[in-house]
Image: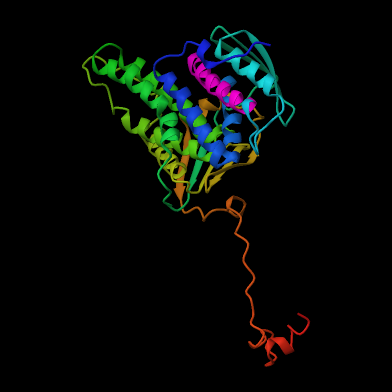
Amino acid sequence: MGHHTPGVVHIKGKNVLLAERYSKAWARAVERDPELAAQLLRHAIYRAIGPLDEPNVREAVACAGLYMVDALKRGRRPGMPEDNLDQLEEFFGQVAEGEEMEIDLVGSAGAVAHLQLGQGARTMTQQQVLRLAGARWRLRLGPDTKSPDIDEDFAIIGGHELLRWMEDWMAPYKLGRCTWRDMCRAWRLAFDRLMYRTLIDPTCPRELRRGFATSLMALILALPDGPERAGDAEDVSDVVPSRQVLEWWSEAAGCLAENSTLAATLAQDDGCLLDLRFGAGVRAEVSSELGDIPEMIVTTFGRVAECTTGLPGIPREFRPPRPARRATKIGRNAPCPCGSGKKYKRCCGADG
């Protein structure tokens, strides 16, 4: 088996920065928070083969994955995987170099998807067709909280999609080099990607989710209200959600950016398809009828039925464990806490 290194892959531009920031975030997490480092490695695996990203982005993430695996092979890290490192190295190397490969993805519900990668193409067949017609989101927002500033590496990773859209499409539109509709279609693709990372991706670590959510808010704010040139007023309502829907998603993204409480439910007339809860940075699927690979869910992001406030505080299942309380030491000559009126040493403390 050949040894793969990021140096053999020709990534360039903003994708180099993306690979560097993933690698730096992981290297710092290994020393400070092994659990976060393990989550980042899992996220890199998922994103290297996951939906929506373009081939050059998957290659950049795979390069970061190669860096992680190489560091693990050089020295044992507490809390990090030690098995299958050779297989992980081969996997990331094949994705990074655009080699042809086939993968069977088996979810907890037993659904199987056959994934094919090669020369920049990504195709997938699923046994089960997702029926999402008519499904709409219902959002409930919890009370505002204030979290520390987002780590710089995670902020830059989260902002990668926003930066690409602004440089590759927003600026050219301002200069008259692309149409209003083309710019909006590129915006919708960036919107779908950030929505998926923020809301759906089960592998996304808490701090990175905050980075994606912050970028999502900025992307919504950056979209012009309408075309800026006469004669370029083509209707884009089939591409861009309504302003009301965008305002609601912006509020929801704000909750996730600040680790506030959010309930997001995707429902049809005949029942709930997906019920998500977020609180204190934790994401939980309360229920799901979509299986393990809900790629077509992006078709629903433009449909929100309602957005309400007043969700109670962080649900019990999302609360971090309370630190163990140190037992209060009772002096031997102090009154016994049982209320007998005797000294502790002559009552409940007599056996001590």
Q: Position of residue 269 (x, y in %)?
A: 59, 37
Farthest-out residue, bottom: 341
**In magenta segment, residue 54:** yes
Range of residues picked out in magenta? 51-73
Q: Which residue is drawn at 65% across and 88% down?
A: 333
Of residues 32 and 111, the one drawn nearer to the viewer in this rendering: 32
Q: Can residue 192 be seen in this view?
A: no
Q: Position of residue 63 (x, y in %)?
A: 53, 19
Farthest-out residue, left: 230
In which quadrant of the rendered image does the C terminus lie? bottom right
Judge from the rendering whether residue 160 lies leftward or rightward of residue 107; answer left or right.
left
Q: Which residue is drawn at 65% across and 10% down?
A: 2
Above or below, 317 against 158 in this view is below
Total numbered badges shown on the rendered structure: 0
Of residues 111 and 20, the one drawn nearer to the viewer in this rendering: 20
In which quadrant of the rendered image does the N terminus lie? top right
Of residues 31 and 159, the one drawn nearer to the viewer in this rendering: 31
Above or below, 326 against 203 in this view is below
Q: Position of residue 242 (x, y in %)?
A: 38, 31
